[in-house]
Amino acid sequence: MTDSIEPNSNTPLREQVYAFLKAGLNDGALKPGRFLDLNAIGKELNLSRTPLRDALIRLEVEGFIIIHPRRGVMVKPIEITEIRDTYQIIGALEASALLEVAGQLKRHDIETMGRMNAAMQHSLAYDDFAAYYRKNVSFHDIYLAKSGNNWLLNTVHRCKERLYDFPRRTVFLRSWEEASVLEHQVFVDLLLEEQWQKAADFVRDVHWSFSAQERFIKEYYFAGMNET
């Protein structure tokens, strides 16, 4: 990790510390299951405990760390029960948002989603996971953003970060990503036909269904581990 804190920045110090820690979680410098060396982090950033404490509280609320009284702060490993619950939350929110904005979703929006899905397929062909991930998030954001509900959008983004980041994975489970692209196409086709309820059901009950995706989830997150 490198020092990215700027004392004279217009960004509040606690926000800079938060972003710094998230970057360390993202790139794997702060590893799941490990305790953080808060003294070393504070010394590296040359700051007091207050902005560091504020950032840690926020990260705990968001589910990325666990603060153990008198023991320290641990980067929270992701568990299969958390993945299941997160899928349920994302599926419910995305389906609800879609039904809410159905009348606002224009054909050119849906066609843009189709082009993004094709670009995701292209990223797969070139093993570009970073591009695939960005386009995947943007695909869903086309309809989510139309709700105007920033709390909903931020919640979905934070859930997806929890699934895909900390650390950010750099490899595909190709069978899963290819299946996801096919699901996106089914979803787009339903939207083009203005079958809003069926599209909402599909995104909740298939695309973000833990039971429908469980075989991929276990292989992607827990291959080689004694996870059931």
Image (cartoon, rainbow, N blue to C red):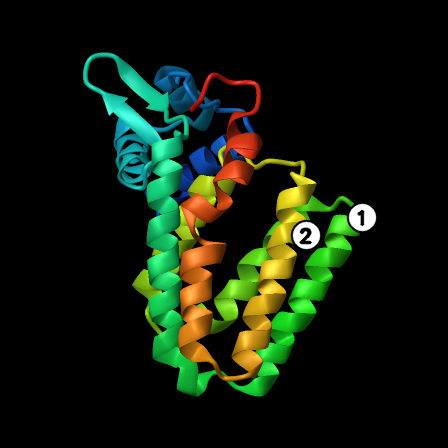
Residue beneath label 1, please? 126
Q: Residue furthest right?
A: 126
Q: Report the mark closest to the observer, 1 or 2.
A: 1
The answer, for residue 136, to whether it is visible in the render is: yes
Which is more N-terminal, label 2 or label 1? 1
Label 2, on which residue?
Answer: 131
Residue 48 seen? no
Q: Quadrant of the C terminus?
A: top left
> Which residue is depicted at the point 44% across and 23% down?
32
Determine whether 58 is above or below 11 in the image.
above
Q: Quadrant of residue 198?
A: bottom left
In the rendering, at what x and y percent does residue 29 appear? 53, 24
Name the spot of residue 117 as percent of width and height, x first: 66, 64
Please provide percent x and percent y for residue 65.
34, 29
Look at label 2 and name its amino acid.
Ala
138 shown above or below 173: below
Q: Determine crowd level at label 2: few under 14, some 14-19, many 20+ residues with C-alpha closer than 10 A.
A: some
Kind of residue sitting beneath label 1 = Tyr
